[in-house]
Amino acid sequence: MSYEKRHSCEGLFIVFRKSDANIQFFDKSAKICRLSQITSRIRYEIFFIFAQIFKTQILNITIVGTGYVGLVTGTTLAELGNTVYCVDIDAEKVERMKQGHVPIYEPGLEEMFLRNIQARRLFFTTDLEEALPKSEVIYLALPTPPGEDGSADLSYVLSVSNQIGDLLTDYKVIVNKSTVPVGTADKVRETIAAKTKIPFDVVSNPEFLREGFAVEDSMNPARVIVGSESERAKDVMAQIYQPFTNIGIPIIFMDEKSSELTKYASNSFLAVKITFMNEIANYCEKVGADVDKVRLGMGSDDRIGHRFLFPGIGYGGSCFPKDVKALIRSGKQEDFDFQILEATESVNQAQKVILVSEIEKYFGGNLQGKKIAIWGLAFKANTDDIREASSLDNIEKLLEKGATISAYDAIAEENVRKILGDKISYSKDMYSALENADCLLIATEWSEFKNPNFEMMAEKMNNKAIFDGRNMFALEQVENSGFFYKSIGRKTLG
Ligand code: NAD
């Protein structure tokens, strides 16, 4: 089909030209726009225009679990025009969302969330029984935390599947967005089928969003993976994601098991890439090489690429650590040793606290009574998520050794307070955290730390020492500041 249309949006004219193979967007001066240059507001208009052209059917969708994945997926699907019912067992959270409060920090989410509530496309409830009959499709975005042996705990997914089995009255597609081991679609299917004779399909549709960029990633995914062998379910999934395929985002269909494994394989690969680079960085220090140079040299090869080559104090978060563990565990169940993942896990664990021994060495082996300022608590920048954050491992070790901590993180502080309470002190800005500190440890790469006033820092601190776990500064930036500066994989200054 070929199609061309001029459309006005936000004072811009965008011309859509679509042939079967290619779609291009032009701005009013006839320059080609890449999709990434188009604001989400305009993209939203584009989705709607294509929905009209291709007569995309708007669906009613239930999302069970409104965490980082569920809430962002639900809001995105509403943004694409569907009516979405978000279900969560956390009554307080549901109440806050009904009042228009976004319960997580995710750039760009609030605007889209409020727009869709106002448009009456996004609803919240604690009652699956209320939402399910209204929906053709049920997404599961439930936690799959590591169990005691490291395997993914499927109890949330299977208990909701059980409920779904009791509630089915007509055909539904159950879409699993949680990260789950190979074979989970079968388990979900068996659990529901044990309760009902009504036909249904179970689809694997893993999520690849990055916290901190979740809205951007959900509105503009690199690809959509759908695991299903049911033609009926595949048609429904193709319909849901048609606004994406219409603008050239690929949807890759495969069997459920391959789809489930694609998610673990992707996350584990990235964890290995980060960890490999951390080992190269540690080796750089031994031989006097500079990891920044090595990183640039390696990344310029497009078989390697620049991303995920930044060394630091290890990966954390709610996904990489648990997904690496779960894949190792799944392997063991088949008598298969993921040797590379076992090594990755142990190297990463050591990397997370590699600067504690450096700090200890700097203070002659005694941290008793030392005041350590920490900049950044979130597991990475642009999120309030602190699950498996390196900051927490460092804090635990430093407290054990008798140090006191004054921390600053404008976004993640509230979540850390819930776990650590007043075991550490919290500062309202990055400079007041430094008051009388014996050294600074940087644990998260928040942008506001990139270009600090070193003079002001020196005035506040007892002692001029920085241990930078995220290589925030170029060495030249710190060189003449008089600070002792220890980063990862580079020469130590001072
Ligand atoms: P989360 O912990 O942020 O949210 C889970 C939500 O489910 C919570 O709001 C919780 O109250 C709710 N819940 C628990 N039991 C429920 C029940 N019985 N009924 C209704 N709601 C229930 O989790 P998340 O980070 O959104 O992750 C969800 C899944 O997606 C996990 O499998 C995770 O591995 C995967 N995933 C996460 C990310 C990420 O960046 N966070 C990215 C890709 C995939």
Image (cartoon, rainbow, N blue to C red):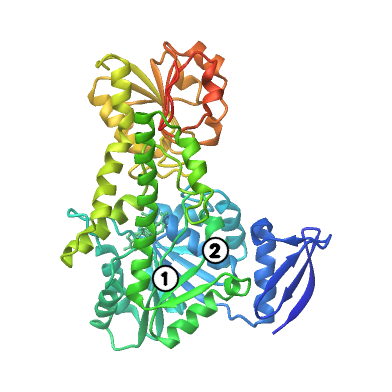
Task: Residue 465: name its quadrant.
Answer: top left
Residue at x 15%, y 65% (from the top left corner): 335
Q: Vertical placement of 215 versus 186: above or below?
A: above
The image shows residue 217 at horizontal and vertical percentages of: 53, 58
Instruction: Check disc 2: other Cα within 10 Å, few if <14, some if 14-19, many if 20+.
Output: many
Mark carried by residue 104: none
The amino acid marked with disc number 1 is: Asn
Query: Can you say whether 207 is above or below 18 in the image?
Result: above
Q: Earlier in the sequence, mark 2 or mark 1?
A: 2
Q: Residue at x 42, y 70 (%)?
A: 205
On screen, residue 71 above or below 131: above
Q: Quadrant of residue 53?
A: bottom right
Q: Which of marks 2 and 1 is in front?
A: 1
The verdict on label 1 being within 8 Å of ligand 1 is no
Q: Where is residue 308 in the image (x, y as percent from the top left)?
A: 45, 48
Front residue of this view, candidates 30 and 239: 30
Mark 1, residue position: 205
**Callout 2: SS:** helix
Q: What element carries label 1?
A: loop
Callout 2 touching callout 1 (CB < 8 Å): no
Q: Where is residue 202 in the image (x, y as percent from the top left)?
A: 36, 78
Image quarter of residue 380: top left
Q: What residue type is labelled 2?
A: Thr
The spot of residue 195 in percent (x, y) is: 25, 82
Residue furthest out toward the front: 287
468 with respect to 330 (left or right): right
Between residue 351 and residue 91, name the one nearer to us. 351
How far apart marks 2 and 1 lie (CA) works out to 15 Å
**Residue under numbered circle 2:** 76
User: Residue at horizontal 30%, vertical 35%?
Assistant: 393
Q: Quadrant of ligand 1?
A: bottom left
